[in-house]
Structure formats: C-alpha cells, structure tokens
Image (cartoon, rainbow, N blue to C red):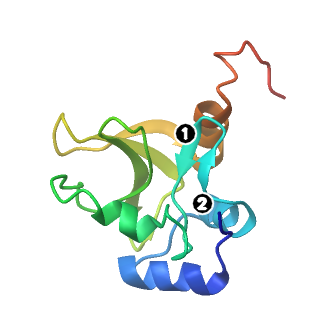
Amino acid sequence: EYIATSKDLQEVEQYIGEQLPSEYVYFSLNYNAGYFAFLNIYSLSPDSEWYLIDKNQENVNVIMPTGFVAFSDDETGGYYGFVKEGMNYSNEVYFFDSSEGRDAKSTEECFFDFVINKGFQPDHFGLTLP
C-alpha cells in the first residue's frame, strides 16, 4: 500500500471541505492504509485501492449521515468514521450501520484507541496493554 503525502492530505481535505482529525492525519502520513491487523483503514493516497474518497462514494445505495466521513468499514454494511464539529472533524470515532437508519453513534473512542481496540483486539486475546 501507499503512505499518503501532504499533497494527498491537502487534496482530500479540499474535496471534503474540512480538516480531518489530527490522529487520523498522523496515522495516514506515517503508516500504510488498507488492512491493518484486524481492521481496514482508508487511505489518503489516490493510488491506493483503499482511497478514502473512492470508498466513501463506492456504495451508491448507502446515504451517509450529513457531516460524516468514513475511514473504515466492518465489511457487513457498517462504517466507522468522523463527524464534523464546527469547521473540522473530531478525533472521536462514530459507527454508522447502513441497515439501521441515518444516525451515526459514538464509539466513545478516539482514533488511536479505536485502532488499538479494533485492530489488535487486546480483550479478545487476553492482552493487557500499558
């Protein structure tokens, strides 16, 4: 996969019209997107098959909530994403189930905690993290 560049970030933020959350931006500029442990994370690189813009547009039958941008999916019709707060997107992760309605619900986790808990699943494996 491709690590995003500052130019890629600028193009995505220009397209969505707002700044993405700082934790997601840091991750995207420093790590590969796509499958990441037990999780998939959309990329800011237009060369990636996991390109955030394409992934948010690929299912024309799903109407995402207003102000919601997905950065991951659960591969069963659910999407993890960010909700716009004012002029920017928050680091807080929300879940939108496309089969249940129009509202995204908070996971009560920031992006980094979400990646640890969903990606590495420490509870499932009985791991204690520092």
Question: What percent of the width, then of the height, locates residue 7?
Answer: 60, 87
Residue at image position (60%, 47%) is 35
In the picture of the structure, the residue carrying the numbered disc 2 is 24
- Which part of the image, by quadrant, shows the C terminus? top right
The residue type indicated by label 1 comes to Glu
Residue 6 relative to residue 30: left or right: left
Q: Specify whether residue 101 is in view.
A: yes
Which of the labelled discs sits on residue 68, or is there none?
none
Q: Report the front residue among 18 and 69.
A: 69
Q: Amino acid at mark 2?
A: Tyr
Answer above or below: position of 74 versus 123: below
User: Is residue 17 shown to the viewer in this render?
Assistant: no
The residue depicted at 57 percent of the width and 78 percent of the height is 9
Horizontal relation, residue 112 to residue 105: left or right? right
Distance, label 2 to label 1, CA atoms, is: 13 Å
Image quarter (top left, top right, bottom left or bottom right) of the N terminus: bottom right
Q: Position of residue 26 (x, y in %)?
A: 69, 65
Quadrant in which residue 33 is drawn: bottom right
Label 1: how many Cα within 10 Å (few below 14, some 14–19, many 20+)? some
Q: Is residue 23 left or right of residue 78?
A: right
Query: Could you say where residue 19 lies in the image, as x and y percent from the top left?
Result: 49, 75
Say the numbered circle drawn on residue 109: 1
Pinpoint residue 47: horizontal percent, then vertical percent: 55, 75
Q: Nearer the viewer, residue 95 or 86?
A: 95
Local secondary structure at mark 1: strand
Residue farthest to the right, as pictured: 130
